[in-house]
Image: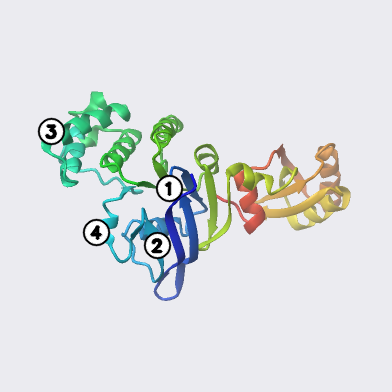
Amino acid sequence: MTDDIIVTQALTKRFPPDIVAVDGLDLNVHAGEIFGLLGPNGAGKSTTIGMLTTRVTPTSGRAEVGGVDVIGRPAIAKQVIGVVPQTNTLDRAMTVFENLEFHGRYFGMSKSDARREARSFLERVRLADRASAPVMALSGGMAQRLMVARAIMHRPQVLFLDEPTAGLDPQSRLALWEILREFHDEGQTILITTHHMEEADQLCDRVAIMDHGRILALDTPTGLKRSLGSATVVKITASGDLEKLAEQVRAVVPSALRSTIADGHLSMTVDDASGMLPRVLAAAEEAGVTVTDLSIAEPTLETVFINLTGKDLRE
C-alpha cells in the first residue's frame, strides 16, 4: 500500500459570507487502505468527501482520485468512484434487484451482465432474499447495505462512505462493518467519514482527525493513541467548579500531564493512576465540589481528539 490513489494539495472550500469549511487540505490516501476522516459535526468531513466526489466545487487547490483531476475532469472522475451518501438515494419506484440492475446498465453493462452482477452483489450484502422487495420495505441497515452494493457494483477505484452508520442500531452497524472488511480484503480502497471513534478504531488502517476544516493529526489508530505515551485517562464527573477541581487534582497528583473540561466532565491524562480515587476525593473536598462519577481507562481516539482540541469528539 505505497501508491497514493487520492492526492489533495491545498484543497479549500469557502462558503459565503466567510465560512471556511475546508482549509488548505493536503492529503494522501494509499491504494488498498481503509482511510478514515474522524471529527465532530461541522469539522469539514462531508465537504471534503463532496469535493473528492465532484459534488462540491472547491474554491481553490487541487485533488486527484485514481489519477483523475476531479476538478478538471469531473465526468471521468465519476467513473472511478463509488459513493454512499448520508441520505438514502435509492429509487423507491424500483425493487431491490432493479436498483442494482439499473445501476449496472447506467455504467454500460449489458442487460445480462447487469442482472448477473446484481444477483452476485445481493448475495454479498446478504440481501438475496429481498431481491423482489420494494425499497420502502427495507430497514435502515438493509438500505445502507444496498447502497454499498450499488456504489461498488461498477468496481470503482475508491469507495466513499459519508457517515455510513449514522442512525443504525449496533447490530446493523456491525453487519455493515463486516461487509466493508470483506470488500477491503479484496483490495478495495475505502474512504469513510465518521464521528464515531469506535468505527474509526475498528475499521481504518489510518485515521485523520479533523476539526475546523484542518487535519490535526494523521496516523494509524494505534499510532494516534500511542502519541499520548503510556498515559492513563481519568474522567471525573462532578458538580461545582471543575477548573478549581483540576487545579487541586494537579496539586495532589504529580503525574498528571494535562487536563481538559468538556460536557461537564474533567478529563486528565496521568502517568500513574494508582490510588486515584482517594486523591481525587481529597482534591474535590478541598475544591468544594461533589464527585458523582470517576472512571479510569486506556487512551482512545476521543482522548487524542480532546487533547488536541480541548473539546469532546461528539460535539
273 vs 15, left or right, is right
Check the image and tell me how it is coloured.
Answer: rainbow
Q: Position of residue 109 (x, y in %)?
A: 16, 41
- Residue 112's tag is 3
Secondary element under disc 1, as helix, strand or loop, is strand
Asked if residue 205 is positioned above or below residue 59 in the image, the reply reads: above
Q: Earlier in the sequence, mark 2 or mark 3?
A: 2
Q: Position of residue 28 (x, y in %)?
A: 48, 55
Q: Could you classify mark 4 by the number of other residues whose Cα lies within 10 Å: few (under 14), some (14-19), or many (20 or more)?
A: few
The residue tagged 1 is 191
Which label sits in the foreground, 1 or 2? 2
Residue 43 seen in render: no
In the image, what residue type sits under mark 3? Ser
- Residue 63's tag is 2
Label total for image:
4
Callout 4 touching callout 2 (CB < 8 Å):
no
Q: Earlier in the sequence, mark 1 or mark 2?
A: 2
In the image, what residue type sits under mark 1? Leu
Q: Could you classify mark 3 by the number of other residues whose Cα lies within 10 Å: few (under 14), some (14-19), or many (20 or more)?
A: few
Q: Earlier in the sequence, mark 1 or mark 4?
A: 4
The residue tagged 4 is 75
Q: CA distance from mark 1 to mark 3?
A: 31 Å
Q: Which residue is depicted at the point 36% across and 47% down?
A: 158
308 vs 202, left or right, is right
| Viewer-closest of 305 and 125 | 125
Q: Position of residue 58 (x, y in %)?
A: 37, 67
275 vs 313, left or right, is right
In the image, what residue type sits under mark 4? Ala
Residue 136 seen in render: yes
Q: CA distance from mark 1 to mark 4?
A: 20 Å
Q: CA distance from mark 1 to mark 2?
A: 14 Å
